[in-house]
Structure formats: C-alpha cells, structure tokens
Image: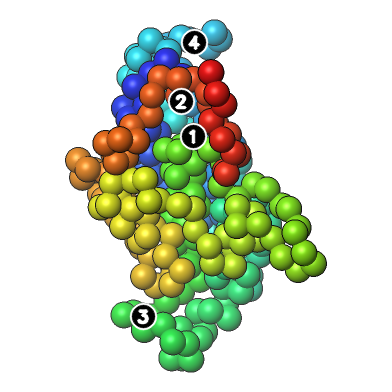
Amino acid sequence: LRGCKKGRLLEKIFRETLDGLTVIHTSGTYHNDIKLENVMITCKQHSLMCNCMKNGQLDNLCVKICDLGMSKTAAFSSYSSGNLGGTICYVPKERADIAGLVHSLNQGKTMLKPQKMWTPNDIYIVCDVYAFAIMAWELMKSMLAGREIRVADPGQVCASSPLAMFNGLRPDVSEFHPELAAAFGRWWAHDPTARTSSAEHLRQELARPYQLKLAPRLEASPEELDAGPREHGSQTPQR
C-alpha cells in the first residue's frame, strides 16, 4: 500500500477480488482458501520493476485470485462433511461440518431460522465471504488478524490467536465508520444464514460511499502506510 492513496487502492483490490470470486462461484466452484497470500496484484504494462502503485497509476494494475488447490466444486461439495485445511484465521466454524450443518438447518434442528432450504454450495459461498471479510479488515488496518498462537494457560489462547477467532471472537472494528463496522458484522456473522449471501451482494454493499472510511480521527497517515502490515496487537513503531 506504500506510496499510493490507500482508499483508492483498497477499493480496487476489494472490487476486483469480489469480481473474481463472483466468476468462480458462478462457475460452480468455491475457492475455500481466500487470504492475503492468495490475492495478487500484477501490472498490465510492466512485467518487472513496476512503479505504477507507487505512482498512483492504478488503471495499469490487475488484481488476481490464485491458488485454487483447496477449492470445491458444486458437483462434489455434498460429498465432503467439511474441512479445516488452510489458514485457520480465515476459516469459519461451520466449515468443520458443512453436511451436518445443512442437514440440521433444513430439519429445523438448530436455533437458527433460515428463510430457505440450504445446500453445501450455499455454505461454501458464505465461507468465502467470511474469509474475504477477514482479509479486508487486515488490509484496512494494515495488520494481520489471528496469526499468533500463544498459550497462556493449558487450553487457553490469546484473543488475537486463530483459535480464538475460530471459536467466535472477531477483529476489532471500533475504529471504523459505524456503518462500515455494521457491514463487517454481516460479512463475518457467526450465524452463516445471516451472513451476506454472495460475493456479488458484498460488492454491492462496498459500492456505498461510506464503506471504506475509518473514523475521521483514524485515517491512516503516510507514516502508517509506509510501515506496512504488522501483527494484530502490535504497536506502531515510534519514529
């Protein structure tokens, strides 16, 4: 994000990532491993040593989703009860037993009140939506969410650990514009049936003008942008 207006670049990354996810989902495939490492920025004009991001020439840049090694297809999604492969901080809890959740939802055996019959394909889509939300938070905050595993006492993990997120904690959005914070609440909702239901719907929400703004006092400074990503919970270094 260095040397560029952060809001413009984030808008491009989010929009084109969601465009790519929409195409993937429309083809009957579910990525299943959306994360920072699997979203790449390339330049259409230069193959090496590109300064387009630094110079703000964002039209030359293209955002691409890579690594579909963990993807699922609609034809085979019902044969899998779920999996926890990949980077755990991007994995919502329902992915542990997708077939069981779908059965419970459709039989009315949960406290959730879905408005339709659910399929494994629907769950895989909202799992990708959840992972995108975690990635979007990381980019907006310039820090990594839930990458630490620190055991304080046996069976306990710190609040920024991936296991804590898997068990229900979510990254802090108190510094975001209130409407944006509410949007994140929909994107990573604990109840998968209440989550934003597709990448296309999420893209429509991001098209609203307020969405990429932090609270006014918390707009990132050039020094913060130059600092690059840091671990969740770490302090901005003193200069």
> Earlier along the polypeptide chain: callout 4 or callout 1?
4
Q: Residue 231, position in %: x, y?
A: 60, 39
Q: Amino acid at mark 1?
A: Ser
**Which structural element holds mark 3?**
loop
Q: Which residue is mark 4?
A: 50
- On-image quarter of the N terminus: top left
> Which label lies toward us, 3 or 1?
1
Compute the Cα span from label 4 to label 1: 22 Å
Q: Residue at 76% across / 58% down in the picture?
A: 151
Q: Residue 118, position in %: x, y?
A: 42, 76
Using residue 222 as the reference point, say whether residue 75 is left or right of it: right
Q: Amino acid at mark 3?
A: Pro
> Earlier along the polypeptide chain: callout 2 or callout 4?
4
Q: Which residue is mark 1?
A: 142
Using residue 72 as the reference point, say whether residue 133 is left or right of it: left
148 vs 120: above or below: above
Q: Is residue 146 visible?
A: yes
Q: Amino acid at mark 4?
A: Cys
Compute the Cα span from label 3 to label 4: 48 Å
Residues tagged 2 and 1 counted as in contact (Cβ below 8 A): yes
**Which structural element holds mark 2?**
helix
On residue 224, the disc is 2
Q: Residue at 47% across / 87% down in the picture?
A: 110
> Which label lies toward us, 2 or 4?
2
Q: Which residue is mark 3?
A: 114
> Which label lies toward us, 2 or 1?
2
